[in-house]
Image (cartoon, rainbow, N blue to C red):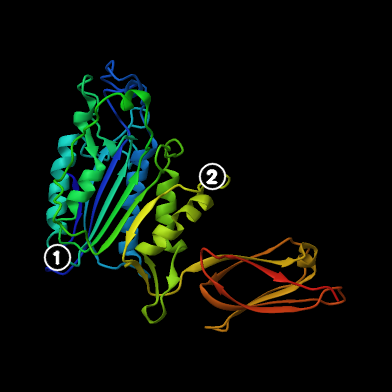
Amino acid sequence: MALIFSKNNDGAPQTHAFIIGVGGYPFLLGGIHEQQQVIEHIGLLKQLTSPPKSALAFRDGLLAIESDPNIHHNKPLGSIELLLSPSPDDPEPGIPGEVFEAATFNNISAAYNDWKKRCDSHEDNVAIFFFCGHGVEKMDHFLLAEDFGDNPNNPWQKSINFNMTRSGFHSCKANTQCFFVDACRQITGEMLSSVVLGNALDTPNLLTTPCLNDLTTEAAAKTKAAHGPKRKPSYFTQALLKALNGVVADNKGRHGWSVTTGDLAVHIQTVMGIVKPGQDHVGRCPSFLKTPVDLIRFDNPPLVALSIACNPENATPLANLSCKDLNTFNTQTRNPNGMASWEIDVISGIHELTAEFQNSEFQPCRRHENITPLDNFKELKCLPL
């Protein structure tokens, strides 16, 4: 069964997710039914261990938000469709003995139709699509199902034309539609010299108005690759989950703390840099955004791992440092201890930061700062006496 989670909400709007993770490609290099492919580059595509882990991590992340007393989906989680094709190198990516419905093209098509029908039941539903696996791009982006390459003369029969599918889904009533694609977008010389069609899961209608709240985010820019460690969730998936769990959250005033589609679109590249430091993420994770809307809400402000230092840096080990939460008036302090910086956990919001010195060459410094999970390093400028 592709439907692994279902919760009746008596007709009220819900969040419905469709998750696909493809790591095992039986007809490609290293697959159990490996075939010689007519298109040379296609024959070089390998088995993947990260996409199944990514799909399961995304599933677990949505379920964890649903059960967390402080974090909530803007619309309660109503269903999760999951299709998974494990790699031969990691045949049990989930709990030992856990069985998944394979992410073949026909299974994907059938599950897509069921998912769209649920999303179409209410205009205030939230539709979430997540794919992780092989991808290639010519004019359109093509996502490769498990049975891609079963016909070596025309492997594209078992690929999904993502652009046309995304356009076709706009006919769904759900006002909020989020599509996350964690796949490469590279192109080869063989693809340039051949016709690439693929199959859409939906039929675009040129008269259909796009949804009110659209977010479409991809892990890679055009011609670029998506990356992930072996047997672990991809860097994009790790960043996406961090973002949904509050790293990009902000205080929306009387509406409280939340993560919006806009927060994801604007900050996902920054979070990628946190997940994988040192890798050039500029230009990665392109997003199409229309009318930001809340996805995740918080009853209480998120926690922040705050780092405080002085400028110049030789003032830091000499400083009496304090951090006062101006909402709760809770104060944390640190005496001079020779450490380069002060690492503490605080609640997001406005804090008063102070650096004072005894028998030192630096003047005291006091500042009010807005602390958020993404803005978690603060430097106090301490002038010399």
Left or right: residue 224 compared with residue 40: right
At label 2, counting other C-alpha atoms closer than 10 Å, the crowd grade (few under 14, some 14-19, many 20 or more) is: few
Say which residue appears at 69% left-offset and 79% top-offset: 366
Q: CA distance from mark 2 to mark 1?
A: 41 Å
Left or right: residue 162 compared with residue 385: left
Q: Specify the amino acid type for callout 1.
A: His
Q: Nearer the viewer, residue 32 or 258?
A: 258
Q: Residue furthest top?
A: 36
* 302 is higher (above) or lower (below) than 134: below
Counting every numbered tag in the picture gives 2
Say which residue appears at 20% left-offset and 21% top-offset: 151
Quadrant containing the N terminus in the rendered view = top left
Q: Specify the amino acid type for callout 2.
A: Asp
The image shows residue 263 at horizontal and vertical percentages of: 41, 63
Quadrant containing the C terminus in the rendered view = bottom right
Left or right: residue 63 compared with residue 324: left
Say which residue appears at 32% left-offset and 27% top-offset: 192
Residue 122, label in figure: 1
* 131 is higher (above) or lower (below) than 172: above
Give the structural element (helix, strand or loop) at label 2.
loop
Q: Circle 2 sits on which residue?
A: 280
The image shows residue 86 at horizontal and vertical percentages of: 31, 34
* 31 is higher (above) or lower (below) than 66: above
**Eye-nearest disc, 2 or 1:** 2
Task: Tell me which numbered mark, 2 or 1, is placed earlier along the sequence.
Answer: 1
Give the structural element (helix, strand or loop) at label 1.
loop
Q: Quadrant of residue 131?
A: top left
The image shows residue 211 at horizontal and vertical percentages of: 22, 61
Left or right: residue 270 compared with residue 20: right
Q: Quadrant of residue 363?
A: bottom right
- Is the Cβ of the residue at disc 2 closer than 8 Å to that at disc 1? no
